[in-house]
Image: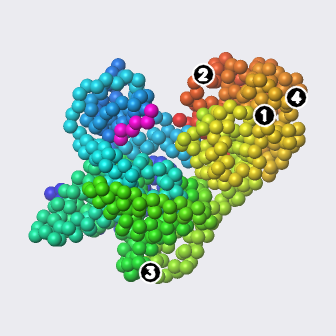
Amino acid sequence: MTLKILLQYRNRYLYIAMSLTLLILVINSVLYIIIAIPFLYYIYKNHSDLVKVILIFIGIYTMSLFAFNNLEIKEEDTYNVTVIKDIKTDNYTSFLGKINHQYIKVYFDENISIKPGDKLIIKGSTTIPSVSTIPNTFDYNNYLKSQNVKYTIFTDYVEEAGSSFSIYLLPYYIEKYIDKYQPLSGGYVKTFILAEKSGIDIEIKNQINQIGISHLFAVSGLHIAILVLTLEFFLKKTKLLEKQKENIIMALLLSYLLITSFSPSVTRASIMYVLLVVNKRYKLEFSSLDILSIIFIFLLFIRPYYYFDAGFLLSFLVTFTILFSSIILNKESKLHQLFLISFIAFLVTIPIILKLNHQINLLSLVFNIIFLMYVTYAILPLSYIAFLLPFFDKLNYVFIKIFEFILTLFSRIDILIFKFYFPNDITIIIYYVIVFFLLISLETNIRIKESLFSLILFLILIYMSPYFDFKKSVSFVDIYGDSILIKDSFNRCNILIDTGEYDDYDSLINYLKGKNIRKLDYLIISHFHSDHYGESEDILNEFLVDTVISKHNVLDYEDKTIQCGTIAMYIYPFSYKELNENNNSIIMSIFINDKHYLFTGDIEKSREIDFISEYNLDVDYLKVPHHGSITSSNQLFLDVIRPEEVFINVSVKNLHGHPHDEVIKRYEELGIIVYRTDLMGTIEVYYLFGKEYKRIHSP
């Protein structure tokens, strides 16, 4: 009965998948209603019998969301946790575990020897990681959600309590085998066998991303297709029946799912092969789009936040688009098909690639074809052979070094690398509408040049969007330490005051790139404590910086008004010879949109008193000295400058108790509005057409 119901909607499961996709988009941004309303109207008018089915599927997905969001782990003194997978050891230990059938990410501050299936007793408090408070940066909370993980736990107590069988022992022991028998090429063998890229040198991975061939090193549909073709080639030489050959391939693919720990693209490709075989065998007459849609829907039911996984997004987006484009592809020769597939995949993934890397390389279309051949016919098969026959490790390593040499050469070609970012969801919607019409043009051979011109023109406009931006802004970025970005309208001036502490995740850099900043007019280091200059070297490497100002050269810029676009900047004279480095902080005023901002670095009481003895300022907004420390924000200082509002750059992770309660009380008693990055996340003050707006990115 159930199968009969499913068969009723053949060739239309795409509409159900699209409905779920639009629901997800609207949940994350209400702007996507622009697309959702006409789509639903189309369904209602042309496929009214689907409405109830779509509502049922949406209901099931909503229940899945509700079930995940309401997961709870009861607070206890100790927890019994079973080790599942993703074991990492690097001066600490982390792994994915299970407590009472719920996934949890566990962190321990020492190296311990564990394997999947081990049972541990641990102590600690479960926490739900906060969402990212810095726009356009890595969101750990969303990453965990994509893995069906809600809680983390940091423990300092671990006790072994036995072990049990785990299906994840297979990839664990395979990894140990590769470490032992492929010492030279092991990083690449793990990539192609286990879908685990951690063994490849970070510099090589950066170069792979830069030239746009990272998909060749993510086990995907391409690799599954090659694996299936290889298996079919060898099975043809046997006397097995066609059905038996297919059963063997299906069994091996399902086993490979386990080996790759259910990597999104492997899951999609493997299940699709199995369903295509079942579809053919039982003459169900589902289309390829139906099958792909069913897989998409099923995976979202079991992992409602799977869409936060970039691999999941890229895998389904590219596969759907290629299936949509079958008419276009079938008209071309094999060579043209290869180029067109690369071109179409490149087009539809641009917004996602820009979100991940903040840049695209137009030469990746060429690089992709070159390296596709090399990886497909050299590194990939040699990695499989070296895995089975370890004495091929050295030969594989030779081909890998040739690849890395060519890769390094190509990565130095940066003439067609464009660094930009889609500024909002509206621009993404417009982009995909243009791509949709371009694909229609390619299919019908009508107005191809006009469609292509529209796409190129739109991308140029996005690239140039900072020059059309009417907004001015002052942003207090929620990093560890101080960092304030000041932007003029029309990209006339970009000033960065301090960079915060060194950050492996480059949160500040990604924030700036997300603002489409490619050049800083001024980088100002208020003083030389690491929570103010820690990221300065990375900033200088990533951006063109016209002028760096610090205490070493500030004499050239102080005691005069510096005009940067429509923003005026004034640095107050000082000797910078204090023993206390905090009191060597540069004090400066910024005048933007008729507002006076005073930036004080980490000055303490003595410097505050000296400052107000020389200057009697009318200040609108104050960047609170020294993160709200009790050593600063002296009462006399506040009585003199009397700001309307103050901004405290302070991390929720700071270990110094900033800001001090007494300091907060002083501001509040004076009726001053207090904004804090530890409570409010990144705070952005915008000026548009003479009016002020604030945007807060709360944790």
Q: Earlier in the sequence, mark 1 or mark 4?
A: 1
On the image, numbered disc 1 is attached to which residue? 586
Task: Please give the name of the residue rendered at 44% of the width and 66% of the height, measured from the top-left corner.
Answer: 371
On the image, numbered disc 3 is attached to which residue? 444
Please indicate, yes or no, whether residue 179 appears anywhere in the rendered image: yes
Left or right? Give the position of 528 relative to 420.
right
Q: Position of residue 601 (x, y in %)?
A: 73, 31
Mark whose residue sits in front, 1 or 2:
1
Residue 57 versus residue 363: which sits nearer the camera?
363
Where is residue 221, by image quadrant?
bottom left
Question: Quick one: label 2, few (<14), some, or many (20+) residues within 10 Å?
Answer: some
Q: Earlier in the sequence, mark 3 or mark 4?
A: 3
Q: Is residue 156 above or below residue 283?
A: above
Name the disc covering residue 615, or none: 4
Q: Amino acid at mark 3?
A: Thr
Q: Position of residue 666 (x, y in %)?
A: 71, 20
Name the disc covering residue 657, or none: 2
Name the disc covering residue 301, or none: none
Q: CA distance from mark 4 to mark 2?
A: 30 Å
Left or right? Give the position of 261 relative to 134.
left
Task: Please give the name of the residue rendered at 63% of the width and 41% of the height, measured from the top-left corner.
Answer: 535
Q: Amino acid at mark 2?
A: Gly
Q: Amino acid at mark 1?
A: Ile
Residue 262 versus residue 446: which sits nearer the camera?
262
Q: CA distance from mark 1 to mark 3?
A: 63 Å
Left or right? Give the position of 642 relative to 109.
right
Are the two marked residues, 1 and 4, in contact with CB atoms closer than 8 angstroms? no
Residue 580 versus residue 146: which sits nearer the camera?
580
Q: Where does the magenta region start and end?
A: 86-91
Q: Position of residue 675 (x, y in %)?
A: 65, 31
Mark whose residue sits in front, 1 or 4:
1
Task: Please give the name of the residue rendered at 43% of the width and 32% of the height, measured from the top-left corner.
Answer: 92
